[in-house]
Image (spheres, helix red, strand yellow):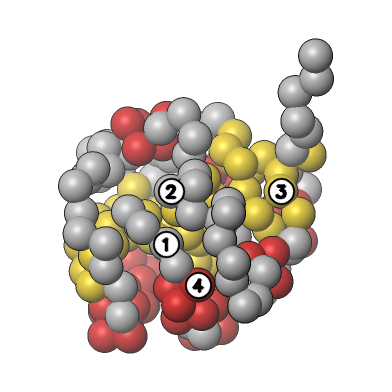
Amino acid sequence: MKIGTRAPKWKTPCLLKGRWQYLPLTAFHGTQFVLCCLPAFTETDAWLLEQQVNRFHAGGTVLAVLIPDDALLGHSWCRPPQDFGLPFLTDPLNRLERSLHLTASLPPHRCETLFFDHRCCLQFRLFHDLNLRGITTVLEVAESDFCQRSAQPVLKSRLTFDHFLAHCSPLEAPTG
């Protein structure tokens, strides 16, 4: 995906506010967001990312995570995944991976993060370690003049997940 290209419009499964639902990336329209794309996902990763959500919100940015579709299934976590306070998107058909041109061979503790502006256009792509230093770098880029020049200051007050819920549709198991 080239810089300046809009995010794909199709819906992908998302664990948001304790419920599985379908969420399009365009639901983030109107706010700057970063999408951390992880090749592997553990409970420790979830704890690390959740601790950073408020820092991102304070800077006017939403943090979302794209995880492998099997990352939340079959694991015995101490804290259930639905209790975490950030949106976990999955990509069971690899549509996002293909359209965003994500790197398929990252080591487990590396992360590819995409920065989108308030119009859902890709602004920047960053490869980093999934640790506090790497996430701090992501936050610094999100707060930089480079990413903030297209942000609308009035939108910072809209950073609640309720805004995104209006764009979700329920995730239903196929019947028959």
Q: Considering the numbered disc 4 on the image, is that residue within a helix, a strand or a loop?
A: helix
Is 14 positioned to the left or the right of 55 in the image? right
Task: Please rate how many residues cluster around mark 3, counting C-alpha atoms within 10 Å: few if below 14, some from 14 to 19, many from 20.
Answer: some
Q: Quadrant of the C terminus?
A: top right
Amino acid under disc 2 = Pro
Amino acid under disc 4 = Glu
Q: What residue does disc 4 label?
A: 43
Q: What residue does disc 3 label?
A: 20
Q: How far is the residue under mark 4 from the one under mark 2?
A: 13 Å
State which quadrant residue 173 falls in: top right
Q: How far is the residue under mark 4 from the one under mark 3?
A: 18 Å
Q: Considering the numbered disc 3 on the image, is that residue within a helix, a strand or a loop?
A: strand
Q: Quadrant of the N terminus?
A: top left
Q: What residue does disc 2 label?
A: 68
Looking at the rendered structure, which numbered label has been put on residue 41? 1
The answer to whether residue 21 is above or below residue 64 is above
Residue 105 visible within the image: yes
